[in-house]
Amino acid sequence: MKCRVWAPRAERAELVFSPDGERIPMHKNARGHFEVDHERFVPGARYGFSLDGGPLRPDPRSHFQPEGVHGPSELTAFDAFTWTDSGFRQAPLAGAVVYELHVGTFSPEGSFDGVIPKLDYLRDLGVTHVELLPVAAFPGERGWGYDGVALFAPHAAYGGPTALRRLVDACHARGLGVILDVVYNHLGPSGNYLGQFGPYFTDRYGTPWGEAVNYDGAGSDEVRRFVCDNAEYWFRHFHVDGLRLDAVHAIFDQSALHILEQLSSEVDDLSLELERPLILIAESHLNDPRFVRPRSQGGLGLASQWSDDFHHALRSVLTGDRDAYYSDFGEIAHLAEALQHGFAYRGQYSQHRQHSYGRSPSGLAGRHFHVFCQNHDQIGNRAIGDRLGHRVNPGQQRIAAALTLLSPYVSMLFMGEEWGSKSPFLYFTDHSEPELAEAVRQGRRREFAAFGWDPERIPDPQAQSTFAASKLVWDELSEPEHQSLLSFYRALIQLRAREPSLASDALELTRVEYDEAERWLALLRGEVAVLVNFGSESCLVPRKPTALLDTSLKLLLVSDDRVQVTPDGVALPPHSVTVLAKGR
Amino acid sequence: MKCRVWAPRAERAELVFSPDGERIPMHKNARGHFEVDHERFVPGARYGFSLDGGPLRPDPRSHFQPEGVHGPSELTAFDAFTWTDSGFRQAPLAGAVVYELHVGTFSPEGSFDGVIPKLDYLRDLGVTHVELLPVAAFPGERGWGYDGVALFAPHAAYGGPTALRRLVDACHARGLGVILDVVYNHLGPSGNYLGQFGPYFTDRYGTPWGEAVNYDGAGSDEVRRFVCDNAEYWFRHFHVDGLRLDAVHAIFDQSALHILEQLSSEVDDLSLELERPLILIAESHLNDPRFVRPRSQGGLGLASQWSDDFHHALRSVLTGDRDAYYSDFGEIAHLAEALQHGFAYRGQYSQHRQHSYGRSPSGLAGRHFHVFCQNHDQIGNRAIGDRLGHRVNPGQQRIAAALTLLSPYVSMLFMGEEWGSKSPFLYFTDHSEPELAEAVRQGRRREFAAFGWDPERIPDPQAQSTFAASKLVWDELSEPEHQSLLSFYRALIQLRAREPSLASDALELTRVEYDEAERWLALLRGEVAVLVNFGSESCLVPRKPTALLDTSLKLLLVSDDRVQVTPDGVALPPHSVTVLAKGR
């Protein structure tokens, strides 16, 4: 088969087979691609490239790194897997419930195949999409995946490409869509050989995690091709339904055609070709509606973006947290803004950032925002990886769940939150270079020392035990408190799917009323009202000004059965949420 | 009067009067502004600020630096000048002819007042707008102005604020609009004290000329205010009609509301308030139509942008230049693209940049592009500052003029080009710091050594003689060859204004035909045809395929009267241009 690699900086390149080291000279074309056609280059072959006589380096577009990110690549056959999902189409984003999971800690096996036995459980929970933390090969066995370096190679410790195909096919068989988390803003610090091949990186911009990707400088056409081809690869050859684009605020591109607009345009074309919807979701800290506006309106044409504001507003009201970015939140007013508009900050001054940020997302709908009360970052980037459930009481947990799942937005859960998992989600790595390992360890300690943490209490990211402690303990599900929370989540998701008033994600059909002093908030969606008491005292939600409440009311779901509907309003017990509908 | 300065990093600030050094303590408010009300702070007062006991620094918003950029600021009165221009409204951009001039070298006096006696000449030439190279105070007396550091202070050596007001008023009295060149991407290397006052700059991005301006980090609200207030200042208090924004590709801003969109929005509001049109023009290397698209379509809402492509395409066809960025041009095809679309590169691969760039400006009109066959950069950034007229023959000069002035775009001339001035426009500076002076000198030599220039032949930027050599020599106008070219320019501008077919700037009404081998190009606008022979042999422009030529023809203007209209077409002498119209 034909073998091809872009290496414009190299004078010579050789295809090198492993383990015997046979070297095949390659031919360079005008645009810097080396090519050779060789009978040994067939599926199953292990190989790499030697540039200008240097050591073997893995293929930048490797399908599989069976011996790790530093070792040879293995060529795979795209047609060797028998797909059974031809009839599957993912659920629409409006109303979707996404379940974010980390393959290594979700199941005891810590692998793609380990996820499959739990899929019936996820389907019964009412989830519509499974979202996998990055699966592109990263250094070592354990890690979150954001240090990926072989962007086309499903991680070997998770089972590699065939196992990922089995997982996607199994999801589709149960009606579950699959979203992959992909990192296009930097590559990990170890095993990143791309810079030896070509100008993949630039020093014109910087990211907190490593060199910025070169999207607009010399050679950037091929870098953009690399990224767009990567997206196509997952959609076409792994049948995934969506990509979650990590930290798009760290993707810098001055081109007249922004890389994300190019990507969304190509993915839309691919969607037409494959005759199934394909979606792109941005993680962004910029509160910029441009990411999800249509390209015809000057937008970048992505399907949806994360709203960190929703999380921060909700958590700070529940927990009283005010450190770091939570200092910009804390009032029910912030939460009301996020519930009503997707973003709380739409141009207002941020005390934490010390500048105004964001912009009105007028004209957008609920499907354009992903909201969550927990996610991998908001748990795992805490010093001891504690979940929301470690900090708040059961009533507050149910408030968080109800506002997330009954909002007009795409709702995302983090694995185990639905039963109040007691496992932390810690930061763990498996770097083989001692210096890098120590730098990560000390960096983590320093980061939290700034918040007054005793460095000795910060779990060692490199320890096997840190990884092990982060695994979900499925046996918890047999305990009543966990079963009770799970039932509440199920009921919420069923309500979301069943109630006609919750079907539309038009934000103009959503109203929010609240009383900061009395600590209540009412989320009003058509005939359905979600009434929340954030306070530790009982409170009364008056029938006015909530016009919805001017009629007979029916309880749909309560977190605390002491709730009382009276002629004056609805009396809510402390830390409780009640869902009602107009009587019918 | 009240005195105010933003200095969030300072603990203390004092208002310091000059020359006696009286110090008045100021009061700090919550957002980092120091304020004080003092009887001595009245127009005419010379003053500065001392931060935390440090030396006197000029006011970042100084109106005037009478003793240079390192000295005290002088407060001026906005209402002391008697304006006589209440009835003036600038000409529309469609059809406009802009005359770019450098105040220091345009007249013998080298001052704002020195420009005034030449305004009748410019009016008679047919110019609609005068564009001044930057006038904000820069180090020393001589310079292009792109090293400005006191962005609100008209340069003292040019005559300061009152003289600038006299010049603008005198332009308006003659029906001439005034455009100021302003630099919002960096500040000059000497006399730049802004960083001592606040976070005006950032290291998250870089520019080739100095630190990037902080438009999206902590403290950026005030930096954006500084820039937007600066624009308002020139419009409101100096009555200018437009701003030319230097190198917007070096303005970095990730905010959801880009600083240029904020600026254009504020300027549009000001235009409504002042009841006269105000325009913003971008210099950009990005070929990105977004700058000039309406804000409602996701654009930044600027009025127009420069097209370097037009210049590069035209020059390379005329001169055969192929070095550096000219390597991307050289065929008549490139020029045809630029004439038809404003940009030649609209997504194509650039060999010089080594990546694709640009984007189709579909839907835009001629007024959205500024074109020119010479400008300060394209002359002054050449090793010996030679003008186009130094390189090409009179016929070719007339071709360049005709294609620039009869294009559907805003046409810009560089001072003196209209008579074929023999003065070079050299790079000159007047730095008082010996190290900086030497660095500029050596930098200039190094830059051109890379193109094979003998360093000894590169004029010394610091020499008074380099500046003096760059002055226009108005006596040249008495010579026949110069008078002849000037008459041709006048005739072109009159045609532009008079011919109904040239009135519309709709690009779909423009057609371009050419024959690369025969070296001719036809620019067809309604009933008017501009026929060019780039070659050194005579050529025949056939009646087909230029549908315009299927009727009787009338000569409107010829650069060479040997032109012949025949039944087969139009026979053009070498290096000539002919303008015809359908017979009437």
Image (cartoon, coloured by chain):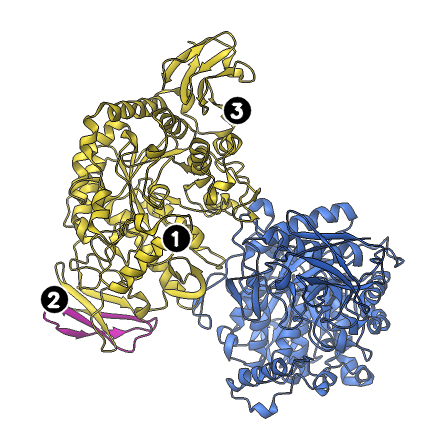
Chain colours: A yellow, B blue
| Element class at badge 2 | loop
Residue A157 placement (x, y as % from top left): 17, 51
Q: Is residue B68 above or below residue B83?
A: below
The quarter of the picture where residue B129 lies is bottom right
**Residue annotated with mark 1:** A447
Q: Disc 3, disc 1: CB below 8 Å?
A: no
In magenta segment, residue A29: yes
**Residue annotated with mark 2:** A40
Q: Nearer the viewer, residue B390 or A206?
A: A206
Residue B85 placement (x, y as % from top left): 86, 56
Tag 1: amino acid:
Glu
| Element class at badge 3 | strand
Name which residue lies at 18% across and 45% down: A111
Q: Disc 1, disc 2: CB below 8 Å?
A: no
Q: Which residues are magenta?
A: A8-35
Q: Chain of mark 3?
A: A
- 10 Å crowding of disc 3: few (<14), some (14-19), many (20+): many
Q: On the rendered structure, is A199 left or right of A546?
A: left
Name which residue lies at 47% across and 61% down: B347
Residue B167 placement (x, y as % from top left): 83, 66
The quarter of the picture where residue A443 lies is bottom left
Of pointers 3 and 2, the one earlier in the residue sequence? 2
Tag 2: amino acid:
Arg
Residue B233 placement (x, y as % from top left): 75, 56
Q: On the rendered structure, is A446 left or right of B153?
A: left
Of pointers 1 and 2, the one earlier in the residue sequence? 2
Of pointers 3 and 1, the one earlier in the residue sequence? 1
Residue A514's disc is 3
Q: On the rendered structure, is B156 left or right of A62?
A: right
Q: On the rendered structure, is A23 left or right of B381?
A: left
